[in-house]
Image (cartoon, helix red, strand yellow):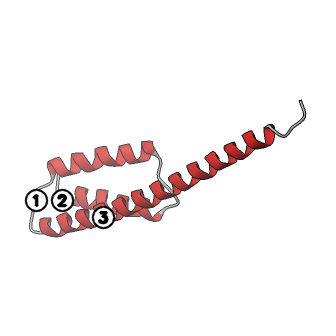
Amino acid sequence: MSDLELKAALDAMEQLLQGPGMDAPTLLAWQERFHEALGTAERGPGWPDLVARAHGLATRIDHAIQQLTAEKNALAGELNRSAQGARALKGYRPS
């Protein structure tokens, strides 16, 4: 295969990052495609550009992971506070 397969895999990840969200099966399929393309790439004259692009995407992915983790933690905190409030209100109900 040529480096074009790797370029296509990087294009696909850019589209995933621009979309509304990613699910695990989509990411796993992309990862398989990426590793296959990486293993068969010719590493031709445009290779340094592909590597730089892949590293840039990795930085964007790390940033997205950090944002999603922060949102998940905030949501978990809200759910915990809601559960505590529900338990507190339960104590005030007549038995």
Q: Residue at position x 52%, y 57% from top?
A: 71
Q: Earlier in the sequence, mark 1 or mark 3?
A: 1
Residue on which disc 3 sits: 59
Q: Is residue 94 above or below residue 30?
A: above
Q: Give the number of the mark in front: 1 or 3.
A: 3
- Number of other residues with Cα within 10 Å of mark 3, as a class: few under 14, some 14 to 19, many 20 or more: few
Q: Secondary structure at mark 3?
A: helix
Q: Earlier in the sequence, mark 2 or mark 1?
A: 2
Picture quarter containing residue 5?
A: bottom left
Residue on which disc 1 sits: 43
Q: In the rendering, which numbered label is found on residue 3?
A: 2
Image check: 83 left or right of 61?
right
Q: Quadrant of the C terminus?
A: top right
Q: Are marks 2 and 1 in contact (CB under 8 Å)?
A: yes
Q: Give the number of the mark in front: 2 or 3.
A: 3
Q: Are marks 2 and 3 in contact (CB under 8 Å)?
A: no
Q: Nearer the viewer, residue 50 or 58?
A: 58
Q: Nearer the viewer, residue 88 or 19?
A: 88
Q: Are marks 1 and 3 in contact (CB under 8 Å)?
A: no
Q: Nearer the viewer, residue 10 or 23?
A: 23
Q: Residue at position x 16%, y 47% from top?
A: 39
Image check: 44 left or right of 86?
left
Q: Residue at position x 9%, y 63% from top?
A: 44
Image check: 12 left or right of 34?
right
- Number of other residues with Cα within 10 Å of mark 1, as a class: few under 14, some 14 to 19, many 20 or more: some
At which x and y percent is residue 61?
35, 60
Say which amino acid is labelled 2: Asp
Say which amino acid is labelled 1: Arg
- Number of other residues with Cα within 10 Å of mark 2, as a class: few under 14, some 14 to 19, many 20 or more: some
Q: Secondary structure at mark 1?
A: loop
Q: Distance of mark 2 from mark 3, alpha carbons? A: 21 Å
